[in-house]
């Protein structure tokens, strides 16, 4: 458990956080809503690679992710969300580094995520993570072209990669 502001605690999620996390996603547009069951799996099967931030018993932010099954040294960040009550204090970066500092991530050297090509806020946050990690920031444009999502989606996803990370090395 790590504190940020006096009233915000960053911790590993628990099964009982699944429904509040699911609700938080709805309250932080434009995040894609996953099923409640998907959030349950993040809070149980993947809890070691996810984090929640709470203030006065209410979730104000979360990070979900996992170790890439084909690249065990890569942390794939699935989704991140910070409610307005948690903004303005670098909470997203603190949560990512909190996860990377855990023993489960000690071999991680890279962070990856896919981000919609038009999501400037996410890009800026990942660039800030790269700066905080003193790492390189790479963009693979059109990693997932819009067509792979079917006819309902017209936005491509770019793959962002941050490498080499310093947090896992520094937390040993």
Image (spheres, rainbow, N blue to C red):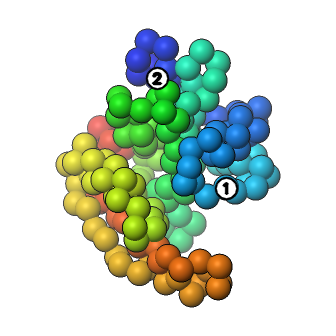
Q: Residue at x 65, y 84 (%)?
A: 150
Near mark 1 (Cα within 10 A), the count class, few <14, some 14-19 or many ≥20, is some
Instruction: Name the residue nearer the viewer: 147 or 169.
Output: 147
The image quarter in which residue 18 lies: top right
Q: In which quarter of the image is residue 153?
A: bottom right
Looking at the image, can residue 102 be seen?
A: no
Residue 61 at x, y percent in the picture:
53, 35
Q: Measure the alpha-carbon separation of dots 1 and 2.
A: 27 Å
Which residue has dot 2 on it?
2
Mark 1, secondary structure of its residue: loop
- How far from the left and from the top, in percent, is residue 26? 66, 46
State left or right for residue 144 relative to residue 39: left
For residue 106, above or below residue 116: above
Residue 100 lies, in percent from the top left, at: 43, 43
Q: In this view, does 13 lie above or below 41?
A: above
- Mark 1 or mark 2: which comes first in sequence? 2
Q: Mark 1 points at which residue?
A: 33
- Answer left or right for 133 relative to 148: left
């Amino acid at each position: 458990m790590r504190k940020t502001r006096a009233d915000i605690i960053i911790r590993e999620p628990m099964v009982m956080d699944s429904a509040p996390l699911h609700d938080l996603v709805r309250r932080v547009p434009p995040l894609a809503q996953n099923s409640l069951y998907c959030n349950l799996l993040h809070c149980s099967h993947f809890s070691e690679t996810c984090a929640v931030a709470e203030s006065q018993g209410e979730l104000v932010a979360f990070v979900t992710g996992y170790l890439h099954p084909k690249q065990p040294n890569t942390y794939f960040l699935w989704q991140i969300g910070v409610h307005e009550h948690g903004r303005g204090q670098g909470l997203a970066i603190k949560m990512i580094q909190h996860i990377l500092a855990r023993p489960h991530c000690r071999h991680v050297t890279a962070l990856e995520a896919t981000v919609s090509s038009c999501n400037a806020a996410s890009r800026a946050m990942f660039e800030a993570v790269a700066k905080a990690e003193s790492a390189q920031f790479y963009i693979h444009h059109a990693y997932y072209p819009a067509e792979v999502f079917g006819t309902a989606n017209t936005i491509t996803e770019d793959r962002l990669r941050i490498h080499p990370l310093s947090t896992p090395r520094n937390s040993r």
